[in-house]
Image: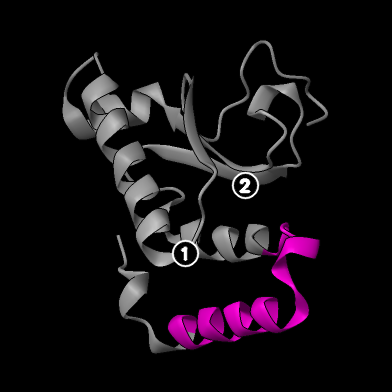
Amino acid sequence: MANIFNNMNLKEHIRKVLKEETDSGFDKNPEKYVKLLELLLEPYKNDNGICDIKVSYDFGNERFLDQGAYIIRIEFGIKDVKEITGSIFPNVHIDKIRYQIENKITNFLPINNLYVGTSLTPECGKNRWWDDDNN
C-alpha cells in the first residue's frame, strides 16, 4: 500500500483546503472534509481486502445527538481477506484496518465526530445475489 502521507503534493493540498475552510468559515459547510477524506482514503481501496470506501457527512438528528458526523464505510471482500490472512475468520484483520484508518484520519485532520464502520461482501468486484443488476 502506498504511503500517501509522505506525498508533499497531498500535504500541500490538505493545508490549502484547511486554510480555505478556516478563512471561509468551516462551520457553515462541514461537508468540505468529505472530498478531502475521499482523497485521503483512495490508496486504501483495492488493498488489504478492501473493495470500496464510502465517505459521507450526516448533519445529525436523534442518531447523533443533534450533532453532525463523518461516516466512513469500508466494504471488505470475504474471499479477498481470506486470501490475505489465510483465515475464514476475518474479524482481527478487519478491525486492525478499521482502527488504522480511523487513527490516520484523526491524527491528520481535526475531526471530532467520526464513525468508521465495516461491511462484508462475498468477493470484491462481483455482484452479490441481493444486489440489483443495474447498480
Point out the image quarter for the C terminus: top right
- Would you place residue 19 above or below residue 41 in this image? below
For the point 29% across and 30% down, the residue is: 95
Question: 10 Å neighbourhood of mark 1: few (<14), some, or many (≥20)?
Answer: some
* Magenta span: chief secondary structure: helix
For the point 22% across and 25% down, the residue is: 92
Q: Secondary structure at mark 1?
A: loop
Image coordinates of residue 34 in percent, x first then y, are 65, 57
- Would you place residue 94 above or below residue 88 in this image? below
Closest to the observer, 97 or 80: 97
Image coordinates of residue 75 in percent, x first then y, are 50, 32
Q: Earlier in the sequence, mark 2 or mark 1?
A: 2
Closest to the observer, 39 or 116: 116
**Label 2 sits on residue:** 55
Closest to the observer, 93 or 20: 20
Give the quarter of the image for residue 63.
top right
**Label 1 sits on residue:** 109
Q: Is residue 7 left or right of residue 124?
A: left
Residue type, label 2? Val
Q: Is residue 66 left or right of residue 115?
A: right
